Amino acid sequence: MDAIGREADHGWGPEIACLVFLFWLASGTSYRVVSRAFDMPRTSVHRAIHTTSSKVASLYYKYFKHPTHLQRYTELTSAAMKRKSSTEVSPAPLPKQAKLWEARRLFYSVQLQAVVDHTAKFIDVCVGYTGSVHDSRVLKNSPLYLERKYPPPGYFLIGDGGYPCLYYPITLMTPYRQPLRNQLQAAYNSRLTKARVVVERAFGILKTRWRAIFLKALEVDIRYVPEVILCCTILHNICLSQGDVLDVEDGIAGGAGEEHPEREAAPPGTVSGAQERDRLAGLCCAPQDHDYI
């Protein structure tokens, strides 16, 4: 309430509207059921949910900030490494557009691409592309890629095998594809996997907290789904900033880091990050501590 304000724009008051919205997010039920739970007209429930979600979504730039002071690390296992990933959320698609929303695993989805920091907070998200769109295409059309504001020089993002390995316009390191050629590549992939644990945890917490949103089909207008997902990620950050951390429930996978059997070619005008990746692979096998005594 401190973030969205307490100014009343209707008779029910902003606190009640916020409770209605949170109840709906937590239960994933229909407006009719929420109406009965709060003894409110269905039109008031609809207005409260959409008004509050709009206010929460407007907090994006307050709770999603790229770090400005980064400590330099030399190992991929460093906790401060950022990782780019995507997951999918199932909406109820419009019949004429069903094929557009069909994901690789043959269900309908909206994609959520995210960058996560070492505390499992989201620092950048791009949501709204249909499930049929390849992750690398989502990346090249995202503001993060087009605006080239992050990561700063000397740092890089970590992505799964669905993304191209890039040095420019953003630096994005991905795993070596199978079969691996040598021990250097194996060591690099192992370090990369360890560094990616944090994003699996972030998506796991997100799905545990909002299981009704992320683990079943949403029965809302498809145009409203991206805003709902964005609100969940913002509330995720607010909860973590207040120390409200959930343990990931058994059986709820993070959903990030899936190895894609196909990898699209890098977009025109990019510079491959293969040489930088080879350099990092060499560092993974280099001895870090020396004891000459």
Image (spheres, grey):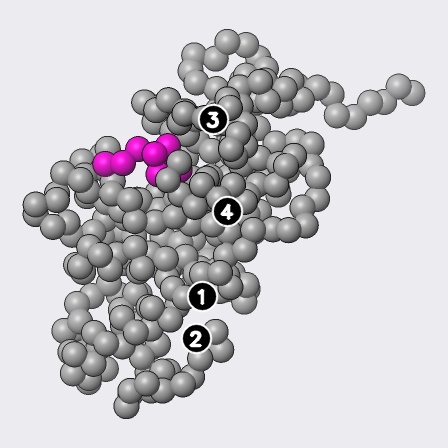
Nearest to N terminus: mark 1 or mark 3: 1
Residue on which disc 3 sits: 270
Do residues under tags 1 and 3 come within 8 Å of each other at their CB atoms? no
The image quadrant of residue 140 is top left
Quick one: 266 or 291, which is closer to the camera? Answer: 266
Do residues under tags 4 and 1 come within 8 Å of each other at their CB atoms? no
Dominant SS of magenta comes to helix
Helix, strand or loop under label 4 = strand
At label 1, which amino acid type do we have?
Leu
Residue range of the region highlighted in magenta in the rendering: 132-139
Nearest to N terminus: mark 3 or mark 2: 2
| Residue furthest top as drawn | 181
Helix, strand or loop under label 1 = loop
Taking the spot 51% from the left edge, 64% from the top edge, the residue there is 62
Q: Is residue 276 above or below residue 124?
A: above
| Residue furthest right as drawn | 293
Residue on which disc 4 sits: 116
Q: Is residue 78 above or below residue 276?
A: below
Instruction: Confirm whether residue 247 shows in the render.
Output: yes
Quick one: 272 or 289, which is closer to the camera? Answer: 272
